[in-house]
Every structure is written in structure tokens, then in C-alpha cells.
Image (cartoon, grey):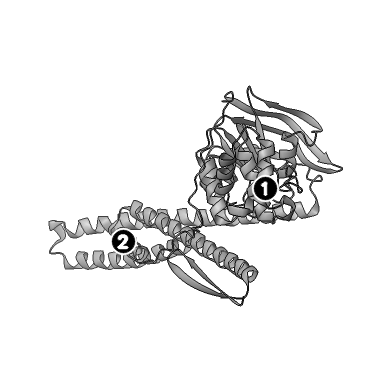
């Protein structure tokens, strides 16, 4: 085999090479399309914010500038969000047992490995129905926290308490709950013997195991296939509190969307670690950030987190006087964050000053327009000339101010 012809989404694409080469190239193409889509969406949101601000000035010149930007925005050839068409399966997850309102309570949690402290005095509350995404830099202890919750590790100090009727379903990246010697079918059948063969096959089909795929040996599956099998097994459990460690790693786009849709309509509670922004935006109702050995809870989606991160960090995880506990790299990273925050504050101050300047100039130009309409000076050529000259100078300054403001908001 030297060539693969891919028919999807109404288009035909030709890939040179065998199937393995095709699969890798298609993955790269999809990743590039996702990146382009995300970049364009960010630019569209930015332009919409600028247009809204220009309109808020409520002046003729600013409205014209807003309309000009709107025309440019309307002509953008908007990219469609990349999707795959392999399957049209939908999972609806409804726990058999409803948990109490308080699902998880963490008090004074501490965990360290030698001199490296991951959590120190961490506090957290999760309630029924929350779909919480845990985020944080690599190495901060996100997976360790999940292992503490599932009693794979013990905390050094503090308390982890679950509410009434809470049943945990755990998904880990290593898929330790799978048996390499079993077949895909037997992995589910042995775990849920009361299920008939049709129900098991339907669940496996939802995660793209069809035909003879169900008889594959688990040990022979790829990383992505094991991920799909582990998730299908989890979905059949009676858990009402799902704890997921990077569930979209290795998943193809179809499986990812199946999982996103299932979790978005899930009636139980979810705590997941993820770096996948699309997954987070599709699933999370709340964001939990692991920052400076503490948990910061953001009662909103990922966009809310991006908007509030600086303020929340200053309030809930202030920099301590004694920084000796942080390693050198951590200190450098923090300094970089401080520099970036200072840069953003400087830009915000500059924008505010320019906005105030624009308002002042618009007001003065408006006042001059009123003077020009005053019958008392209609025959005073000298006065009219002075007003016209001042207005011309102010309009030039106003144009410069608008250009400076638009440059600042684009930085």
C-alpha cells in the first residue's frame, strides 16, 4: 500500500504512504486545523471586544471606527470547528444512586516528597453537580491529588471526607484497572456479568469497538484503544462521582466528543485533570487551580478563570515572605509571571488614560460644535476662525488617540 484516499466531511484527500503513515499525517493535519480554528476564534473575540468598547464611547468617530471594524470582521472566512465523522453515538450517564449535596471536603491537606511540598494547608469543597477541572503547571501534584482522593496515597496531614452516598469511579492514565490477558469483550463482561451481550456490544460500539475488535486482546491494544476501553468500563459503573486523570489523552476526536457530550449532560459530579482547552470548555462548570501549594476555586468556566486568575491568586494564594521553600526554577517562573502581570497592568493603565483622553477630546469637540451653532457668533469671522482652528487641532489629536488606543488593545 503506497497511497491512502481519505473521504470525510464531503472532501477527498490523498495521503502518500501506508496506513500507519496516513494515521499520523491525518493526526497532524487535524492538530493544525484545531490550532488555526482556536487562533481565529481568539482573534474574533478580541475584535468583538474592541468593537464593543468603541461603541461604548458613544461618539460619532468611535462609532464609525466600530462600524469599520465590523465590516472587516463580517468578511472573515470563518473556519469551521474540525470534527470527525466516524460515529454518531451518544452516551447518557445517569447515576443509579444520588449523592448528598456535599460530595467532597478537603481540610488542611499536606503532602510532600522529601523536601518537595506539593500541598500545604489546602482546602476544597465540591458539591453535587459540579464538573470541576483541576489545572496547574506540570509537576505541581495534580495526579498525586487524585491518588490521595482514591486512597492510593496517604496525606501527611489534613482530612479528606466524602459526603453521603458518594460512589467513586476513577480513570487513571496508566489504565491499571485493565487486564492485558482478557479480550475487550471479556473486560466488560467480567466486570458487569449481569449485562447481556447486546448491551456490552452497544457500549463498546459507542467507543468505536465494533465487529471483531471486541475480541482483541487488551495487551495488544494501542494506548488510544486502552483509553477508550477504560472509559467505556467506567461509564458502566454505578459511580456518581467521576475522578478522571487526563481522560482525553490518546483519544481520537470522535471518542473525545462522545466523552464531552456524555459528561456535559452527566447528572453526577466530576473532578478531572486536563490540559485540553476544548475539553475543559465543553465540560467544566468550575475550575480548580493548584497554585503555590493551595487550591483556588473559580466558580465559572475556563473563560471566567482566564479573566479572574490574577485577582484570585492575589487573594487566595498571596506570595509568602519566606520563599526558600521554592526551588530556583520556581522562583524564576514566578518572576516571569510577575513581569508579565506588570506588563499587562501597564497596558491596562495606558488604555485607561487613552480612553479618558478620548472622552475629553470628544467632549471638547462637541462643545465647539455647539458654539459654531450659536447665532451670537455667526457673524464673527475671527471667532469662527479660532473655533474652527481649535476644532481641527483637537480632531487631529483625537485621531492620534484612537490609533494609540487601538494599538494598545492589540498588544
Please state if 42 lies on the left or on the right of 341 as rendered: left
Relative image position of residue 109 (x, y in whole percent): 74, 32
Measuring from the top left, give residue 304's x and y in whole percent: 52, 44
On residue 200, the disc is none
Q: Is residue 246 visible?
A: no
* Left or right of 6 on screen, residue 169: right
Q: Residue furthest right?
A: 114
Cα separation, mark 2 vs mark 1, equals 58 Å
Asked whether 351 or 360 is in front, the reply is 351
Q: Is residue 286 visible?
A: yes
Which structural element holds mark 2? helix
Mark 1 is surrounded, within 10 Å at the Cα level, by few (under 14), some (14 to 19) or many (20 or more) other residues, namely many
Marks 2 and 1, the one that precedes in the sequence? 2
Q: Which residue is mark 2?
A: 67
Q: Please tell me which residue lies in front, 312 or 177.
A: 177
Q: Quadrant of residue 68?
A: bottom left
* Residue at the (62%, 54%) spot, across then down: 212
Q: Are marks 2 and 1 in contact (CB under 8 Å)?
A: no
Q: Which residue is mark 1?
A: 184
Which one is nearer the viewer's eye here, 396 or 272?
272
Q: Nearer the viewer, mark 2 or mark 1?
A: 1
The residue at 61%/31% (across/down) is: 238
Amino acid at each position: 500500500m503506497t497511497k491512502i484516499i481519505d473521504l470525510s466531511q464531503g472532501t477527498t484527500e490523498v495521503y502518500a504512504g501506508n496506513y500507519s503513515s496516513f494515521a499520523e499525517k491525518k493526526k497532524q493535519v487535524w492538530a493544525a486545523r484545531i490550532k488555526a480554528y482556536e487562533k481565529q476564534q481568539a482573534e474574533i473575540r478580541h475584535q468583538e471586544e474592541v468593537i464593543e468598547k468603541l461603541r461604548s464611547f458613544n461618539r460619532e468617530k468611535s462609532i464609525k471606527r466600530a462600524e469599520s471594524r465590523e465590516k472587516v470582521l463580517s468578511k472573515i472566512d470563518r473556519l469551521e470547528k474540525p470534527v470527525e465523522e466516524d460515529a454518531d453515538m451518544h452516551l447518557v450517564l445517569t447515576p443509579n444512586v444520588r449523592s448528598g449535596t456535599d460530595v467532597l471536603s478537603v481540610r488542611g491537606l499536606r503532602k510532600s516528597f522529601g523536601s518537595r511540598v506539593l500541598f500545604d494547608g489546602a482546602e476544597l469543597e465540591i458539591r453535587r453537580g459540579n464538573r470541576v477541572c483541576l489545572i496547574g503547571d506540570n509537576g505541581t501534584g495534580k495526579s498525586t491529588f487524585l491518588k490521595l482522593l482514591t486512597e492510593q496515597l496517604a496525606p501527611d496531614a489534613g482530612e479528606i471526607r466524602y459526603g453521603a452516598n458518594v460512589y467513586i469511579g476513577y480513570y487513571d492514565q496508566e489504565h491499571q484497572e485493565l487486564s492485558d490477558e482478557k479480550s475487550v469483550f471479556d473486560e466488560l463482561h467480567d466486570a458487569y456479568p449481569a449485562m447481556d451481550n447486546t448491551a456490552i456490544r452497544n457500549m463498546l460500539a459507542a467507543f468505536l469497538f465494533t465487529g471483531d475488535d471486541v475480541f482483541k486482546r487488551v495487551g495488544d491494544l494501542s494506548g488510544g484503544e486502552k483509553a477508550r476501553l477504560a472509559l467505556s468500563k467506567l461509564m458502566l459503573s454505578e459511580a456518581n462521582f467521576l475522578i478522571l486523570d487526563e481522560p482525553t489523552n490518546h483519544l481520537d476526536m470522535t471518542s473525545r466528543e462522545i466523552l464531552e457530550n456524555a459528561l456535559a449532560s452527566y447528572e453526577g459530579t466530576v473532578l478531572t485533570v486536563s490540559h485540553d482547552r476544548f475539553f475543559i470548555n465543553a465540560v467544566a462548570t468550575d475550575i480548580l487551580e493548584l497554585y503555590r501549594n493551595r487550591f483556588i476555586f473559580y466558580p465559572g468556566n475556563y473563560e471566567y478563570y482566564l479573566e479572574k486568575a490574577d485577582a484570585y491568586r492575589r487573594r487566595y494564594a498571596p506570595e509568602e515572605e519566606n520563599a526558600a521553600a521554592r526551588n530556583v526554577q520556581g522562583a524564576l517562573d514566578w518572576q516571569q509571571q510577575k513581569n508579565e502581570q506588570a506588563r499587562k497592568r501597564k497596558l491596562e493603565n495606558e488604555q485607561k488614560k487613552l480612553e479618558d483622553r478620548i472622552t475629553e477630546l470628544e467632549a471638547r469637540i462637541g462643545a465647539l460644535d455647539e458654539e459654531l451653532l450659536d447665532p451670537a457668533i455667526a457673524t464673527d469671522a475671527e471667532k469662527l476662525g479660532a473655533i474652527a482652528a481649535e476644532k481641527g487641532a483637537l480632531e487631529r489629536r483625537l485621531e492620534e488617540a484612537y490609533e494609540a488606543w487601538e494599538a494598545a488593545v492589540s498588544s
